[in-house]
Amino acid sequence: MLLIPCPWCGPRNEIEFHYGGQADVSYPEDPDSVSDVDWAHFLFYRDNPKGVLAERWSHQAGCRRWFTLRRNTVTNEIHVDDDASEAGAVTR
Amino acid sequence: MTPRTPGAELPEHPDWLWHSPEPKKSYDVVIVGGGGHGLATAYYLAVNHGITNVAVLEGGWLAGGNMARNTTIIRSNYLWDESAGLYEHSLKLWEGLEEALDYPLLFSQRGVLNLAHSLQEVRDSVRRVEANKLNGVDAEWLDPAQVAEICPILNTSEDLRYPVMGATWQPRAGIAKHDHVAWGFARELDRMGVDLVQNCQVTGFERVGDRVVGVTTTRGAIRAGKVALAAAGQTSVLADELGLRLPIQSHPLQALVSELLEPVHPTVVMSNAVHVYVSQAHKGELVLGAGIDSYNSYGQRGAFHTIEREMTAAVELFPMFSRAHVLRTWAGVVDVTPDASAIMGLTPFDGLYVNCGWGTGGFKATPGVGWCYAHTIAHDEPHPLNAPFGLDRFTTGALVDEHGAAGVAH
């Protein structure tokens, strides 16, 4: 069970959250010029590292806001000592 | 269930079933991953294509990954033609596998019930039954009374929050003893001269241009005419070594068993809505599974609340389970694709083949995967049954969207 530090509400139990996958996946700047291959990568391909992954979580049962945190996918260690877990980080 | 003499059908201890050779410097084919899929692929490379200069490299111990961690359910009642083709081919192979391997797999065609708990689920299920029939897959739609006849311990009363409104029924579905399946393949491969190399972790690939010509391992470099990945949840980590990005995400999938109980549960029951699936192993454990944990993970464990939800569903559907004790819980690392279907076929690298993305459903496909993947490797082109499961479908958009029939939330 993860103890997840919501930037607004503080540490809460994992069951209060919804997982949103990899963070910082940007919508194409110019959608009309994107090739099929690039669309496929935008839609379906995400990093899957054995190690630290920046990911989106939503505090579904609390403030309902989204935020980014960095978590180690092997040890579940959550890194809160860097910019990525700041409240303001929002993916477009 | 007829009573059996305990242990009567147990085979020899695995230590005596295969050797543990030192890896040679070179092979025609190197298979990365010594689980069910890797072993079955090596088997059909030998049997169907006469290729035996093969090594199966396993980072840990033989069949100690997802092969040792799944809930052993075998069925072919998927929705789409592509999936039905592959899983039904696999089920037909299961039906002759004990004879082919001359080894007891405890393959038991006790049937599977996929429950429906809402009007929409009823409609979707009936649609799937009709789709199955068109594909030559045995399937029936059962009303709650018929469900109760097949599985009397199931709570089919209308008092449940999500009452059982009926179920699809595949009589030829069932379970097999997963360890025995691996050991049966391994014994036969050993006899045929295939090297089963354990504690040999693949760390990278050797390349000449866009051709993969070998692997680097914790036991030295090994040259290979062809390299076939069959490493389930670890596949992205391997592919990263080549800069090859794959549309898979690794998640923990938990399972658990109860203590040994008298035979009480005659079939396999799955429910997508309240989310639990359960069968009773030959020895007597209730074997239960549910959906994946939501987040990516390579740790072979998940969170307790997932188990809690699964148990809640199980106890509501099977009130008698409330007195059973949980003996063990564990997790496998499953590789999940965006359309809940596997990826099997060629890669942008010559001499490199990929089989991954089976998510929560790889065990049932074991012999079918072996058959089709061996063909893909031997002929350098996919077998017609796995052609729709190529990597290119994520670009063409020809997805095989099996979320509805995959049976597990992911």
Image: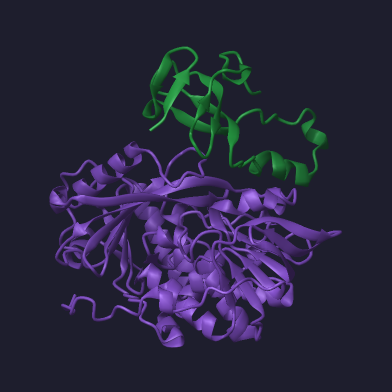
Chain colours: A green, B purple
Horizontal arrangement in the rendering, residue B35 relative to residue B262 (left or right) = right
User: At 66% from the left edge and 23% from the top edge, which residue is drawn?
Assistant: A92
Total labels: the figure holds: 0
Q: Nearer the viewer, residue B99 or B16?
A: B16
User: At 70% from the left edge and 66% from the top edge, which residue is drawn?
Assistant: B227
Horizontal arrangement in the rendering, residue B114 relative to residue B23 (left or right) = left
Question: Taking B213 as reference, is B239 above or below it?
Answer: above
Q: Quadrant of residue B229?
A: bottom right
Q: Quadrant of residue B392?
A: bottom right
* Quarter in which the N terminus of chain B is drawn: bottom left
Q: Nearer the viewer, residue B242 or A29?
A: B242
User: At 46% from the left edge and 55% from the top edge, which residue is drawn?
Assistant: B360
Q: Quadrant of residue B173?
A: bottom left
Question: Taking B269 as reference, is B241 above or below it?
Answer: above
Horizontal arrangement in the rendering, residue B194 relative to residue B10 (left or right) = right
Residue B376 visible in rendering:
yes
Where residue A60 appears, x then y in whole percent?
Answer: 43, 24
Where residue B26 appears, x then y in whole percent?
Answer: 72, 73
Where residue B178 appears, x then y in whole percent?
Answer: 39, 68
Question: Taking B314 as reference, is A52 above or below it?
Answer: above
Where residue B319 appears, x then y in whole percent?
Answer: 15, 50
Residue B138 visible in rendering:
no
Q: Nearer the viewer, residue B307 or B27?
A: B27
